[in-house]
Image (tube, rainbow, N blue to C red):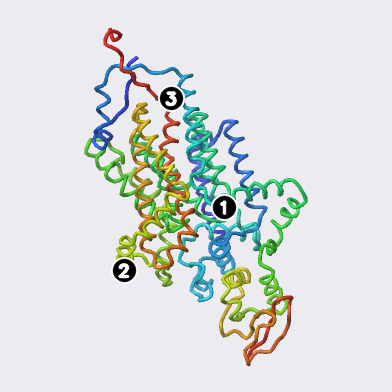
Amino acid sequence: MVPTRWLNRTTNAIIWWADSQNTREPSVSIGPLARRGAAIVLLVMIVLAARNVGESPFTGDTGKGWWRALISLTSGGHGRSAFRDLVTPNSGEQVLPPLVRDMLALLRQHGVQEYAVSPQISTDPLLHQRIVESAFPKMMVPTAPYLLARVGEPLPANCRPMAVEKGIELAACD
Amino acid sequence: MLLELAIACCCAMVILAREGRGAVDALRLGLSTTVCFVLVLGLLGAAILLEPVTAWDARSIWFFHAKMVYFAGGLLKDGGWTAPCCLFSHTDYPTLMPILAAQAASLAGFWNEQLPKFALLMLLVPVLAVTVSYWRAGLATAALLLLAWAKLAPLLTDGYMDALLALYGLFGALLIGSWLATGAKLDLATGVLFVGVALGLKNEGSLLAVTLLVCATPVAALARRDGRQLLSAGRSEAIRFGGVLLLGIASGASWLILRKAWGLHNDLNLGLSSLPAIVRRLTDPEALEMILRSTLVSNHLFYAVLIGGCATGLSYVLRTGRLLEPIFCMAVASGYLAGIELVYLATPTDLKWLLATSADRTTVLPALLFLAPAILLLRDERRWRIEIALPAWLRH
């Protein structure tokens, strides 16, 4: 059987070399079963060749964690609490670093809307970014009347301690 | 915010009412396809919704922006976009996902760290629908696509936009390639909408759109010269296509206007001023080696390039008949990867840090695009022809 081959003029113009096949010797085509087999073999080869594509320490670890998390979520008590958290306001904050949770607790307990942070907190990108995004819409403003600092960190002269929550201190500043 | 959702629902209802039974029939899926669709969406949905946002960029950028939209009641300048304390979150980044996440929280009436992730699930529906539409092409294509989804799953559920961008980019390129090969208008419209979503997901969406435009324009122009009308000259057709195009780029374009008005700039500050940095790194063998190693070798992207090249070659050998599509995908993948390399060459930030924290994510889209010829080769399995040169005495 001589195959009919679809090849339009545009394709011809771009890939001119493709047309050379039309002048080849007569050909035979393989049957559907063989074709299907060839497709499956090709699929296996592609998967084997591509199994590492995109693999890196980042995606590799995340991948394993993802399956573990999914299994644990769907198989026990954690799943039930996850469903409860889904419909609970402000849930999910357990993933925040403990110091950030302490800061959030202090800001909420004292109804603080604008706050500043100490140099130790501000130079730590994890603490700095997590408190800004988790406390929002409370805003971090350098001139705010309240200051969050780590316990033991020296406070500026114009600030006096107000409250302490584990590792974090809230100070009122003039 | 609920107004936009109501408008979208009204539009969908009008289309369904106008098209009537035809539209409903078109939406109907086979049993196996439906089961697969529901299963994949259910698994991903559980992984997305039952865990709080933990990944760094997801918290610091995407869901933080969603929180800003939610608490301001819309995309408003006073919502914190220009506040100095929020600038670390790259407030110039596209806002499609943050807006959807804010809508989800708005509907619920409260904010938490899980429910707004519903936006990720919503964004997965169109790409999953297109994926299952490839089921009809055969078991091998379905298996390959499912494996790609399984591989991408961790990146689809952690709140990063890269895997979503990769899927929208892949299907955008496949659909536009299909339009170039067959002239199917539905493929063009869907492809344009997919690229529109990619534009609203990440800045890299703009790079993808430009690459697609650059690769598709000469093919469309040649088709026109050959008398093959890819776009009808009819007025109603032009209006329809204009509407689709407008819908596709509306989200990205409106954010571009807003961010310019608010004075938000990208920290990479790419432009003509980047030329000295590009020249400096091009002449620095250490920097060049670092970029190529991180983008091509460490994440094994070169395997994808090899597979794409072999699959394109096989499409030629097996005479699949639509050779234009794999070549188009390879061209888009190469152009996009070149653009990514250029960004790394031009970056004003610490190159080593940037590559270590982003190269594995930014190369997900080119990896998928390079694997696209393999998907097309398996899709066209029914058209395969094995050419055998017959001896002269057998020809008669």
Q: Are marks 2 and 1 in contact (CB under 8 Å)?
A: no
Tag nearer the camera, 1 or 3: 3
Looking at the rendering, which quadrant does residue B349 occupy?
bottom left
Q: Which residue lies furthest to the front in this view?
A: B286
Q: Which mark is residue B120?
A: 1
> Could you say whether the residue bearing mark 3 is in a helix, strand or loop?
helix
Residue type beneath disc 1: Leu
Spatial CA distance of label 1 from label 3 is: 35 Å
Q: Which of marks 1 and 3 is nearer the N terminus?
A: 1
Q: Earlier in the sequence, mark 2 or mark 1?
A: 1
> Could you say whether the residue bearing mark 2 is in a helix, strand or loop?
helix
Q: Residue furthest left?
A: B225
Looking at the rendering, which quadrant does residue B60 occupy?
bottom right
Residue under label 3? B382
Across and down, in percent, residue B150 comes to: 57, 42
Residue under label 2? B273
Question: Vertically, is B29 above or below B63?
Answer: above
